[in-house]
Image (cartoon, rainbow, N blue to C red):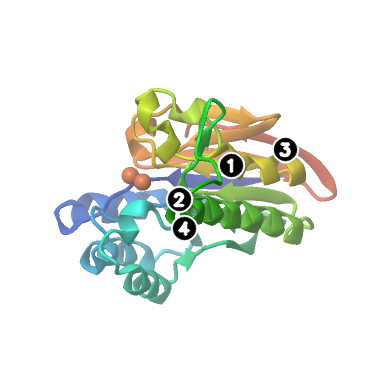
Amino acid sequence: MGVIRIAAAGDVHASEATRERVVAAFQRIEEEADVILLAGDLTTTGEPEQAAVLADACRDLDIPVFTVLGNHDYHAGRQDDIRALLAEAGVQVLERNWRTCTIAGLELGVVGAKGFVGGFPGSVLPDFGEPLLRQVYAETTAEAEAIGKGLQEIVHCDLRVVLLHYSPIEATIAGEPEGIHVMLGSDRLATPIAEYGADLVLHGHAHAGTFGGCIGKIPVYNVAVHVTGRDFWIFDLEGAKGRSETRVEGPA
Ligand SMILES: [Fe+2]
Ligand SMILES: [Fe+2]
């Protein structure tokens, strides 16, 4: 039985104003975790200078860092520059794809996708009408399909994590006004996770949401720092070669 310690945070919203705190938090967590997973909204308004703060915080770390981007990281139309800055610092930016790493003799697979909007049963965006709205629907479809494809492709991994920005379930956005739930995620993102399985699902985006939820027996956590109330939440993910039995623990 091996244990992988995952440090997770969403919605860091870094900027020059928070540089000191962000850099210190990443330095500290390197001692406590095996891998860092970031659930998007790395920047305040999507400026490369803000992403540079995060890149600088990650550059000299000895543990792997995986991230997805969030809607804020797209706001200035500089997402290509943000991706490049993060990659140069060794951060693995996942966009509808997956990566693996080996920790404690276990292969960890991470499927990363931003996810997108669409809502939850009772209030969902339909695939109907104006092309622009149908395009939004199709974007969420593409995210969901990439999650399913990724989970199938890392089926050999001992532990499989899905890293998102938008929520796949309504339980972890509870606390946000119901009128904006449609903008906070989509249950269509949960469908491939339920179908292909995962050991842990992480997302952010809903700053006023709720920490824990599930898709069947699969644990889902909203790790937005506003929700966790700390720089990182640590999950001890247990797994054994050839066994699917896993356990998720927290906090640190
Ligand atoms: Fe955010
Ligand atoms: Fe967001």
Of the residues under marks 1 and 3, which one precedes in the sequence?
1
**What amino acid is at disc 4?**
Thr
- Which residue appears at 33% of the width and 58% of the height? 73
Residue 143 in the image, given as x and y percentages of width and height: 57, 55
Q: Which of the 4 image quarters holds residue 20?
A: bottom left
Under circle 4, the secondary element is: strand
**Residue of label 2:** 133
Mark 2 belongs to which amino acid? Leu
Instruction: Please tell me whether mark 3 sits on a helix, a strand or a loop.
Output: strand
The residue carrying mark 1 is 201
In the rendered image, residue 236, in percent from the top left (x then y), is placed at 59, 39
Q: Earlier in the sequence, mark 4 or mark 3?
A: 4
Alpha carbons under labels 3 and 2: distance apart: 40 Å
Ligand 2 contact, mark 3 (Cβ < 8 Å): no
Q: Is residue 176 left or right of residue 165?
A: left
Along the line of sight, the residue nearer the viewer: 99 or 190: 190
Residue 157, compared with residue 201, is above or below; it is below
* Residue most extreme to the front: 129
- CB under 8 Å between discs 4 and 3: no
Can residue 82 be seen here? The reply is yes
Residue 167 or 31: which is nearer the viewer? 167
In this rendering, the answer to whether 176 lies above or below 45 is above
Circle 3 packing at 10 Å, graded few (<14), some (14-19), many (20+), is: some
Reading the image, the residue beneath label 3 is 246
Location of residue 95 with respect to 211 vertically, above or below: below
Q: Which residue is mark 4?
A: 67
- In percent of width and height, residue 82 lies at 34, 69
> Which badge, 4 or 1, is on the more N-terminal residue?
4
Residue 62 vs residue 105: left or right? left
First reached walking from the N terminus: tag 2 or tag 1: 2
Type of the residue with mark 3: Thr
